[in-house]
Image (cartoon, rainbow, N blue to C red):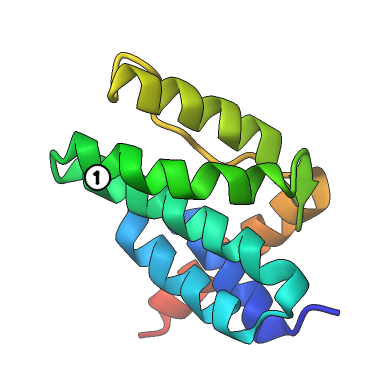
Amino acid sequence: MVRQASMDHYLEGIRLFNAGEYWHAHEQWEICWLASAQSEAMFYKGIIQAAAALEKWKRGQPRGMRLNYVKSRPKLAAFSPWMRGLHVAALITAMDQFVLNGGPPAPVPRITLDPPTAAALAAHIRSLEAASRHV
């Protein structure tokens, strides 16, 4: 069973990734990776390296993007098509296209989720918004 703290970090990483905040997504997922069982560690490493690849692209480092994605792809593929509600196969397809093109005009990859995980992410975002109103 996933501990709630790990789930919160996982969901926050997804939110940040889809917002283009790849470095911060990486930081959230690193917490999950360090707390994960060995059977899930490679999944977290795969999404961390995908985020690192896109961070390199943001910084204008296409070679770094390719090198990070070369490390990420086999880890992600081992968990395709789905893992923890994340559509891994769709992420691989989007990343393949983006990295092959060296960035745009290919769409920037986004994480897609199954309905229960998408609902959990929406609840997570609502809780962040509520907390920010009380600060």
The number of callouts visible is 1
- Residue that badge 1 annotates: 64
Query: In which quadrant is the C terminus drawn?
Result: bottom left
Is 89 placed left or right of 73 in the picture?
A: right
Q: Is residue 75 above or below residue 126?
A: above
- Residue 42 image-quadrant placement: bottom right
Q: Position of residue 48 (x, y in %)?
A: 47, 60
Depth check: give the residue in front, 128 or 63. 63
* Residue drawn at point x = 55 percent, y = 55 percent: 46
Observer able to see residue 124: no
* Residue drawn at point x = 70 percent, y = 50 percent: 118
* Residue drawn at point x = 75 percent, y = 54 percent: 117
SS for callout 1: helix
Q: Position of residue 2 (x, y in %)?
A: 78, 78
Q: Is residue 67 above or below residue 116?
A: above
Q: Position of residue 129 (x, y in %)?
A: 47, 67
Observer able to see residue 97: yes
Query: In which quadrant is the N terminus drawn?
Result: bottom right
Q: Position of residue 41 (x, y in %)?
A: 65, 70
Depth check: give the residue in front, 6 or 83. 83
* Residue drawn at point x = 76 percent, y = 58 percent: 84
